[in-house]
Image (spheres, rainbow, N blue to C red):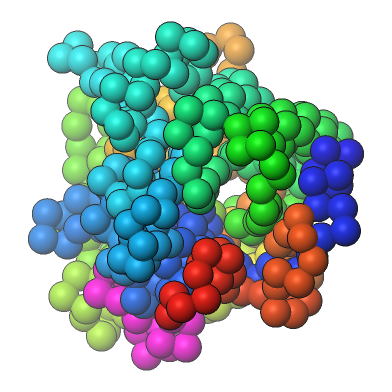
Amino acid sequence: MPNLARLTLGGSYATLVPSFPCVTCPVQANMTTGRLPHEHGVVANGFYWRDQQRVEMWTAWNDCIQQPQIWDVLHDRNRSITSAAWFALHLKGCGADFICTPAPKHKPDGTESMWCHTRPEMLYDDLQDKLGHFPLHRYWGPLAGIPSSAWIVASAVIVAKKSRPNFFYIYLPHLDYAAQQAGPDSGAARKSLAELDGEIGKLAEGMETAYGEAPLWLVASEYAIVPVDDVVHPNRVLREAGLLSIRESDGGEQLDFGASKAWAMVDHQFSHVFVRDADPKVMKRVASLFKKQPGIAQVLPRAQFAEHKLDHPRSGEMVLVSRPNSWQAYYWWLDDARAPAYARTVDIHRKPGYDPVELFVDPKTKSIPLDATLVRGSHGAPATDRAQQGVLLGSVPGVFPGGTVADVDVAGIVLRQFAADIDF
């Protein structure tokens, strides 16, 4: 990768160990707060709001993060230090001075038009005039590809040239797609590396022009995607055991959260199992079911959550952890003909769990297949092996305290570059 190599030539390198769960929202919150899930409350890519009996995946609003983030700490110490936050998760309403994140407008007929939530509010109008709409259909789903990351790069450079924020936090999602579709060692995954490297080159050149000098770069991988050849369906296991309840509707079988004695909110290689009334008999039965389930490495009761920094009220009553070669699918139906209608669509909000099968599409039917074995790469299990760990690169030497850092160290590293008197 010539552009990334040139950016960090003669700089710093460290092995970056993501904290469990090694998935997007918790890891990003770790990096921007310097805290772990038991403190910031982001325990997965989604939340189950018990009082509403409702799952919310990919929450947009920042108030779900219960600790100050980098831009908040900088503002507290020196209001003149400005920050920009670009396309990371949970950005709506965050404390950064400049924000851009997808926020499509939903119409009464069920369709949506593309838009982005920005600060200042009218910033997206300016970006749209220069770049066109953000290509949301290339950000996730079967058409996901480099155009979304290219738009993110171009828009960040525009804002840097105009406003020159002191700190810029940019999320480029491109490496997620091919690695999950075809596997992290596939030709498609290697091609995606080269594509992203090209955009990193444009980003580096644009930022140097904007600031009149090369800024300090920190390049962090959230996690490493590993090959998978197995899938577990926790909700089907719970249903067959008589613990999960469904309700019939014209749109297929729907998971009934309130009536279920136990159900699982799955998320890549782990899931939170919610047990009604925290019934100890049900929890004992759930543990028995999954301890002998192929593909499951650990069944964690609440008594062990503190060890993994997951002891937060938002966590389930139990957590299921996959083996490195396996992942977990949200499916609960036993007959594909009874699957809910949204199962065959790209619908990140109604599905009570993460669904990488959305990356695949049947060209003939234009629908998402219901075959979870198609997925060839995943992440999320504890990063105990080097293959599950990422990298942290710096463009100048001496930035990192050692050869291995945790994701929670990133916030402190950033803050130390701004002011020696910032306590963190």
Inspect this view and state whether residue 42 appears: no
- Residue located 36% across and 77% down the image: 38
Which residues are drawn in magenta? 302-319
Magenta residue check for 315 = yes
Answer left or right for 249 relative to 140: left
Q: Nearer the viewer, residue 223 or 256?
A: 223
Give whichever of 302, 11 is nearer the camera: 11
Q: Position of residue 151 (x, y in %)?
A: 56, 23
Q: Quadrant of the N terminus?
A: top right
Residue visible at 35% across and 24% down in the picture:
123
x and y percentages locating residue 389 in the rendered image: 71, 66
**Would you say residue 171 is visible in this rendering?**
yes
246 versus 13 height, above or below: above
Name the image quarter holding the C terminus. bottom left
**Residue 392 shown left or right of residue 276 in the figure:** right
Q: Quadrant of residue 319?
A: bottom left
Position in image of residue 72 (x %, y %): 34, 61
What is the count of numbered marks? 0
Query: In the image, residue 68 lies at what x, y percent?
Result: 33, 66
* Residue 52, placed above or below residue 389: above
Residue closer to the observer: 38 or 86:
86
Q: Residue at x 50, y 70 (%)?
A: 419
- Left or right: residue 121 versus residue 45 is left
Check residue 300 for magenta coloring.
no
**Farthest left residue in view:** 51
In the image, 15 versus 69, the foreground residue is 69
